Image: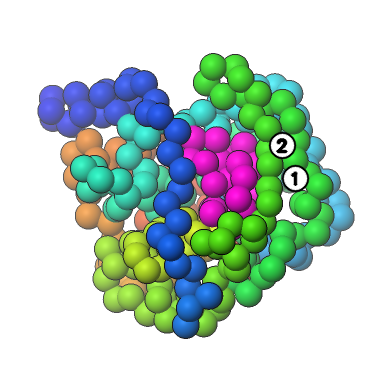
Amino acid sequence: MTKKAAKTRARRSNAPAKKPVVFPAHARLFSSHLEGPPATSLVRKSADALTAQEQQVFKSAVTKAIADGTYSRLVDIHANMMHDMHTMSGMPAGTFRFAPWHRLYLVNFEQALRAFEPQFFIPHWRWMDQSSLPSWMTAFKPSGVVDQNAKPIRITRAPGTNPQARTLPTTSTVQNTIMNQTDYRSFTLALEGARPFGAHNLVHVWFNGTMSNVPVAPADPMFWMHHAEIDRLWAIWAKAHPGQEPVLSGADAILDPWPEQVSVVLTTQVGTYSYSYDQMTL
């Protein structure tokens, strides 16, 4: 790593968190308009397909991680915008870092919670064509998560009540506005929140609560399921478009606050950690 790259990375990692940022709603929701110890072949199942036991393992791991303080520390990582993990004005690398950074975030979260419940995995919530949360998650809004100032984060949800995000994306619009893109930049912009698409951002906005506020969004356990679906869509698209990858170099290629480079997370074999999805079609 060059001295310049090292300085840039240090500046990102050590800079104080910026003011809270709300996920931009970009006015239109397109359905309204036309990954503890390494896992071996871990499978992330659909949230709607979990058994009662798997549901309990998920809730138990989250509850234990909150009590331990681990969960809050993981949430706090997302509060630091200097990690440049979203498309933001004046920080062009964020567009390319969005998918790989969040993939590594999920892997670190999954590993951390498997220390509490060895059978834990992050379900993916297939929000396409849905009108509500998975029924077993509706009432699960655990308390005890705190922000960087030890202030409690209250998990709130009012799904579908934001006028800019009344409904969730449909399979058809995801296919026609995201999955049909042929280059990585266009794909990731459409996946994250480029006008007029906004799949990732607008699902956040649909929650109209904690999930809609960038720094504290991961406090809601639905954050991880939503991002597992985002990760699944990337995995599906990448399989169909070999060679189309995020273009990053120097400090931008280091997915701080972790030491891994973007090259490590281009597939669901992340170092020694391997996972897959139970469904690889829309």
Q: Secondary structure at mark 1?
A: helix
Q: Judge by depth and name the residue closer to the eye, 121 or 202.
A: 202
Q: Is residue 238 visible?
A: no
Q: Residue furthest front?
A: 163
Range of residues picked out in magenta: 204-228
Q: Position of residue 142 (x, y in %)?
A: 75, 35
* Residue at x 85% of width, y 51% of height: 53
What type of secondary structure mainly makes up the magenta span?
Answer: helix
Question: What residue occupies the far top of the structure in this picture?
Answer: 149
Residue located beneath label 1 in the image? 58
**What residue is pinned by disc 2?**
62
Rendered position, 281 above or below 93: below
Q: How far, Cα to Cα, is label 1 from label 2? A: 6 Å
Residue that appears at 78% across and 52% down: 138
Quarter occupied by residue 149:
top right
Give the amino acid type for the residue marked by disc 1 in the picture.
Phe
Q: How many discs appear?
A: 2
> In this orientation, which residue lies closer to the viewer: 272 or 249?
249
Q: Are marks 1 and 2 in contact (CB under 8 Å)?
A: yes
Query: Residue drawn 45% across and 33% down?
Result: 20
Viewed as shown, does residue 272 lie left or right of 119? left
Picture colour scheme: rainbow
Quarter placement of the C terminus: bottom right
- Residue 247 visible in the displayed image: yes
- Picture coordinates of residue 196 (x, y %)? 37, 68
The residue under label 2 is which amino acid type? Val
Return the residue nearer the eye: 188 or 36: 188
Q: Secondary structure at mark 2?
A: helix
